């Protein structure tokens, strides 16, 4: 059995900011105040840290996360801005607005952070503590609301502690968050679309854009997370082109193999094999899941055989994603 971290709570000051940056750099989980709600931060480029974050929240599914950066220059390293996105960012950042944008080329964030999507949600928060931590850390930080899955978003350090004590490393206590609701999410992948109402009123966004906003509300997916309603339009889930064969205990020579654990199936040599975790570690498996699916998808195999993954801990979210990827494509 692994012993969880003991959670430290420290008052926000320059010491706390430095401690938060060190903890993030070491792959730790740090809750910190933003102007909307407390976020649970992890190094966005560290797949294992991101996997630990989903584990700490106890989510049964992987939802894409928001990458937090201190300024527009850092945001440009993660995403491509069209004219509408550019205007919204210029007028409303820093602030409670998240933009969903096409991912930039090159090293942006771990595949698990965007749940394998080609789009990325980015936000520049308007809270001194959040901005100081982001600046001190110097890399993007993914941060969902710092609550257990299914609970409401926390607006004080005490709320965070009540939900996540013993599951995260550090809570930086900067008092109550001023806005108290999550950021407004606008997708700028094509025409701007309102995905989630939040801290910036719709009218303010429409004023900046000079046009009215279409809606595609995020759909509750069984916990506090939401999934976009219109998958055809928004590509809410990464879906491999190849067919997936789940719970495979054998593999054929025309297949690629997504393995898990030390024992791989006997039989033919597959086109290509990638092992999510040879030592059977579900955190490591989650960190590898989306990039391995992509790699096997382009291996030229007839299908991808997927070994069984145990259904505890992050295994539930891994199996959720594998089941969705294996489902016949719906016509959208
Ligand atoms: O105010 C906030 O936004 C807070 C603070 C901590 O910044 N964060 C927050 O994160 O509310 P979270 O994980 O609880 O909600 C993020 C939402 C999810 O509904 C997710 O589905 C959506 O953003 N999202 C993230 N990336 C997306 C993408 N590429 N396409 C569509 N939706 C996306
Ligand atoms: Mg949330």
Image (cartoon, rainbow, N blue to C red):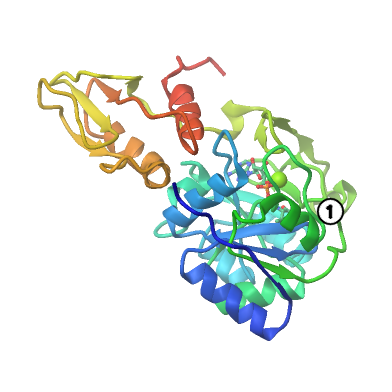
Which of the four quarters of the rendered structure image does ligand 2 lie in? top right
Point out residue 13 in the picture as x, y percentages from the top left corner: 72, 82
From the image, which quarter does the C terminus lie in?
A: top right
Q: State the residue in front, 192 or 250.
A: 250
Residue shown at the point (53%, 68%) measured from the top left: 24
Does the beta carbon at disc 1 come under 8 Å from ligand 1?
A: yes
Percent from the top left, x then y, of residue 262?
22, 37
Q: Is residue 325 left or right of residue 158?
A: left
- The answer to whether residue 38 is above or below residue 283 is below
Q: Count all numbered tags in the image, as a single digit.
A: 1
Question: Is residue 138 at least partly visible in the picture?
Answer: no
Q: Which residue is mark 1?
A: 199
Mark 1 Cα-neighbour bin, 10 Å: few <14, some 14–19, many ≥20: some
User: Residue sitting at 36 percent across and 43 percent down?
Assistant: 281
Image location (x, y in percent) of residue 180: 86, 55
For the point 55% across and 64% down, the residue is 140
Q: Position of residue 164 (x, y in %)?
A: 67, 53
């Amino acid at each position: 059995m692994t012993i969880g971290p003991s959670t430290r709570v420290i008052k926000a000051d320059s010491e706390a900011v430095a401690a938060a940056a060190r903890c993030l750099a070491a792959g730790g989980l740090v809750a910190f105040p933003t102007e909307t709600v407390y976020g649970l931060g992890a190094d966005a480029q560290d797949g294992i840290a991101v996997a630990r974050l989903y584990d700490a929240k106890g989510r049964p599914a992987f939802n894409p996360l928001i990458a937090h950066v201190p300024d527009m220059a850092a945001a440009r390293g993660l995403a491509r801005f069209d004219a509408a996105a550019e205007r919204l960012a210029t007028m409303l950042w820093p602030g409670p607005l998240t933009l969903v944008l096409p991912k930039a080329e090159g090293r942006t964030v771990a595949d698990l952070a965007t749940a394998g999507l080609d789009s990325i949600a980015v936000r520049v928060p308007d809270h001194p503590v959040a901005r100081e931590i982001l600046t001190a850390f110097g890399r993007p930080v993914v941060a969902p609301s710092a609550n257990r899955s299914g609970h409401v978003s926390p607006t004080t350090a005490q709320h965070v502690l009540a939900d996540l004590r013993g599951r995260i490393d550090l809570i930086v206590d900067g008092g109550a968050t001023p806005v108290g609701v999550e950021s407004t999410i606008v997708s700028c992948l094509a025409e701007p679309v309102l995905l989630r109402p939040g801290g910036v009123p719709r009218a303010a966004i429409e004023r900046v854009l000079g046009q009215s906003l279409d809606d595609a509300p995020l759909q509750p997916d069984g916990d506090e997370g939401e999934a976009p309603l219109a998958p055809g339009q928004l590509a809410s889930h990464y879906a491999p082109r190849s067919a997936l064969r789940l719970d495979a205990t054998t593999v054929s020579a025309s297949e690629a193999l997504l393995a898990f654990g030390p024992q791989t199936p006997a039989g033919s040599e597959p086109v290509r094999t990638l092992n999510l975790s040879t030592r059977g570690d579900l955190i490591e498996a989650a960190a590898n899941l989306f990039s391995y699916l992509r790699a096997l998808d382009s291996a030229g195999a007839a299908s991808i055989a997927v070994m069984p993954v145990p259904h505890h801990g992050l295994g539930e979210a891994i199996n959720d994603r594998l089941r969705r990827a294996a489902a016949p494509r719906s016509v959208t």
